[in-house]
């Protein structure tokens, strides 16, 4: 995982090597990671690029202390349901889940800086628990908040992003929206990795971006938004930095026949449509629901 900002990288930024946006400040402790290189601050996206993606804005995205995320809902979520925040499993404040480890219903008071459409600080929302978290098969965390969707909309004027219930398709125009950096990365779905292996973790059916999405540290957990619909199709999580083969921060693709492909400089996300069948009444994560394929504890 090469997308959180922690350790030396985060320290260097805070000490003035780069200026951290106000939306990046949160009260939760950074989760551990092996990334130590200083990450440059992304420049603001040109207005012309923003105009092309009319369905996409920063509204509903969040900044963690070291990662990005978003307030999300599934098609069946109700206004009075406790809201959910989606990020990466490797962004959990409890540390990286080990291979095969699944976290459910663990108490948390983590806070998130909520952004408005232009990337400004709309307010702070807080978790009541980690509803789900894993780095097995996928790399995702879902926090249940103390606020409902109705609370957030009435207090901040912000609506949740909806998770698409359909698998994305190759060639789809997408935007990775980082709440940490307040930057958008625009590209297309280049294809899918049957298996994506990084160190001791393996993820299934990962989304591979075209080279235009050069995501950096701090973009972990960013929603990957379909430009045409504004719905979330994946969660950003990693990329091959140095051309190494299947090592930490250098994931490799493995096909059905075991052939390994290394794509230096290419970044990836984990599909989110698989989450939708696992969310039941009251936004409760129910891993036994029909169609739910997320790993169980």
Image (tube, grey):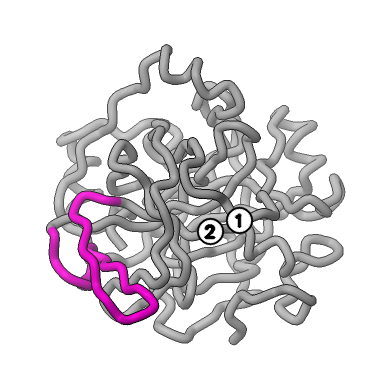
User: Which residues, given as a range, are shown in magenta?
Assistant: 243-266
Q: Position of residue 265 (x, y in %)?
A: 21, 49
Foreground of the two, 76 or 120: 76
Mark sitting on residue 167: 1
Foreground of the two, 225 or 130: 225
Q: Check the image and report above or below for 244 versus 148.
A: below
Q: How dense is the environment of label 2, judged by Cα within 10 Å: few (below 14), some, or many (20 and up)?
A: many
Q: Is residue 141 left or right of residue 274?
A: left
Q: Is residue 257 magenta?
A: yes
Q: Residue at x 76, y 34 (%)?
A: 153
Are dots 2 and 1 in contact, CB under 8 Å?
A: yes
Q: Residue at x 65, y 35 (%)?
A: 229
Q: Position of residue 236 (x, y in %)?
A: 43, 52
Q: Main secondary structure of the magenta part?
A: loop
SS class, disc 1: loop
Q: Residue at x 45, y 34 (%)?
A: 23
Q: Residue at x 33, y 57 (%)?
A: 238
């Amino acid at each position: 995982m090469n997308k959180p900002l922690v350790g030396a990288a985060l320290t260097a930024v805070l000490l003035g090597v780069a200026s951290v946006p106000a939306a990046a400040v949160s009260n939760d402790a950074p989760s551990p990671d092996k990334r130590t290189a200083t990450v440059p601050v992304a420049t603001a996206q040109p207005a012309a690029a923003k105009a092309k993606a009319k369905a996409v804005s920063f509204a509903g995205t969040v900044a963690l202390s070291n990662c990005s995320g978003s307030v999300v809902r599934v098609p069946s979520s109700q206004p009075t349901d406790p809201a959910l925040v989606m990020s990466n499993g490797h962004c959990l404040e409890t540390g990286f889940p080990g291979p095969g480890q699944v976290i459910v219903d663990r108490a948390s008071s983590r806070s998130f800086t909520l952004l408005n459409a232009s990337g400004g600080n709309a307010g702070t929302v807080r978790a009541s628990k980690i509803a789900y978290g894993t780095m097995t098969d996928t790399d995702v965390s879902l926090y249940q908040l103390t606020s409902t969707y109705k609370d957030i909309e009435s207090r901040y004027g912000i609506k949740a992003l909806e998770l698409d219930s359909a698998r994305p398709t190759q060639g789809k125009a997408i935007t990775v929206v980082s709440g940490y950096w307040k930057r958008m990365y625009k590209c297309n779905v280049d294809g899918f990795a049957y298996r994506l292996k990084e160190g001791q973790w393996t993820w299934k059916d990962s989304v591979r971006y075209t080279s235009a999405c050069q995501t950096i540290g701090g973009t972990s957990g960013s929603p990957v938004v379909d430009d045409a619909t504004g719905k979330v199709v994946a969660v950003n999580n990693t990329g091959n930095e140095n051309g190494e083969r299947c090592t930490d921060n250098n994931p490799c693709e493995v096909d059905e026949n075991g052939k390994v492909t290394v794509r230096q400089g290419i970044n990836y996300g984990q599909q989110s449509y698989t989450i939708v069948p696992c969310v039941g009444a009251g936004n409760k994560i129910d891993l036994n629901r029909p169609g739910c394929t997320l790993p169980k504890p």
